[in-house]
Amino acid sequence: MKKVSKLKHQVKSNMYYIFWGACTVAVMAGQIYVGAGYNRMSRSVRDLTEAIVIKMEWEELRRGTGESPFMPMVDPDDYIIWLETNDPE
């Protein structure tokens, strides 16, 4: 009977784990890269949306119609006006 060497099987097993370990690392690196890109893109879209909203608010205020949902019309009688005097009292 022939004696079977276990060394050959062990080398094959090591290469198997190295291969799948490298594949796992490659997939994880790709996921991190895509996630970082998505994060940058969402931040850019958020900044753009904020700029558009600010522009819309500015246009509504410049029209001065008082119909702006951002700046409701206030009755001038509701203002408290403080008068500055030079009296020390």
Image (spheres, rainbow, N blue to C red):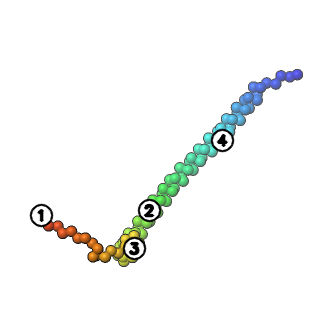
Q: Which residue matches tag 2?
A: 50
Foreground disc of the pair 3, 4: 3
Q: Position of residue 25 (x, y in %)?
A: 62, 41
| Amino acid type of the residue that numbered disc 2 sits on in the rendered structure | Glu
| Amino acid type of the residue that numbered disc 4 sits on in the rendered structure | Cys
The Cα–Cα distance between marks 3 and 4, rounded to whole angstroms, is 57 Å
Foreground disc of the pair 4, 1: 1
Q: Which residue matches tag 1?
A: 89
Decide: is 65 above or below 16: below
Circle 2 residues within 10 Å: few <14, some 14–19, many ≥20: few
Residue drawn 54% across and 53% down? Answer: 38
| Amino acid type of the residue that numbered disc 3 sits on in the rendered structure | Ser
The Cα–Cα distance between marks 3 and 2, rounded to whole angstroms, is 17 Å
The label number, if any, that marks residue 23 in the structure image: 4
Residue drawn 64% across and 39% down? Answer: 22
The Cα–Cα distance between marks 1 and 2, rounded to whole angstroms, is 48 Å
Circle 3 residues within 10 Å: few <14, some 14–19, many ≥20: some
The label number, if any, that marks residue 42 in the structure image: none
Q: Which residue matches tag 3?
A: 68
Q: Tags 3 and 4 in contact by the CB under 8 Å rule?
A: no
Closer to the chain start, of discs 3 and 4, is 4
Q: Position of residue 66 (x, y in %)?
A: 36, 76
In the rendered image, is residue 59 in sight? no
Residue drawn 52% across and 53% down? Answer: 39
Residue 63 left/right relative to 86: right
Closer to the chain start, of discs 2 and 4, is 4
Helix, strand or loop under label 2 = helix
Helix, strand or loop under label 3 = loop
